[in-house]
Image (tube, grey):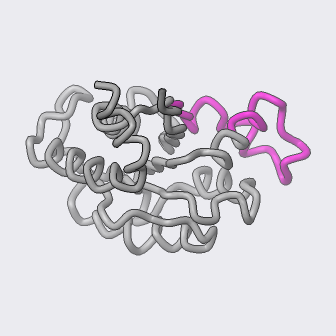
Amino acid sequence: MTKPIRVVAVSGGTFRPSRTLVLTQAIVAELGRLLPIEARIIELGDIARPVGGALSRKELPETVEHELRAIETADLLVVAAPVYRGSYPGQFKHLFDLIDLNALVDTPVLLAATGGSDRHALVLDHQLRPLFSFFQALTLPIGVYASEADFQNYQITSQTLRSRITLAAERAAPLFAGNAADLLKIA
């Protein structure tokens, strides 16, 4: 039996309902359709207050430390951030300020973002990609950006967005080809 791929997804929104969370869940679901995964979604809104008040990791409660360790030990990281004033929110950045400098080296990262309009789509390449390049993570070439127009009542309604999610997951899957090949032998 093949070992499941540990997918840790960080949804960087702090409010509910959240288009960022909906997008994150859709990406994780698509990865689960293609690969044997063990998924965990970390919602920034659930840990925002202790993260925001911490100047170092030593000040965090064990529950938040547990979430940081999950991020640091992921086989595949999915990171989705809402766009706020042309970039990711400061609270989102502070979460990653608390991640160990070498923990994400060579970790594949699928980038995603949500914004009010298509004007913010470059946040993937101009904000998120440099952040994870700093960590020496392997940012995947296909990211997923969704604007407000892609949703209705916090549900994805855009076929173009659904196709982009599928493409991103399909491009991520070959990184774990050994696991996928093992899965096909079992099926």
Q: Is residue 59 visible?
A: yes
Residue 21: percent from left, percent from top: 40, 34
Q: Main secondary structure of the magenta part?
A: helix
12 displayed left or right of 144: right
- The reply to whether the magenta stretch includes residue 40 is yes
Q: How many marks?
A: 0
Q: Nearer the viewer, residue 142 or 45?
A: 142
Q: Is residue 94 above or below residue 126?
A: above
Q: Residue at left 28%, top 64%?
A: 121
Residue 26: percent from left, percent from top: 30, 34
- The reply to whether the magenta stretch includes residue 83 is no
Residue bounds of the magenta highlight: 39-67
**Residue pushed farthest right?**
58
Q: Residue at left 54%, top 38%?
A: 6
46 displayed left or right of 22: right
Q: Is residue 145 visible?
A: no
181 displayed left or right of 170: right
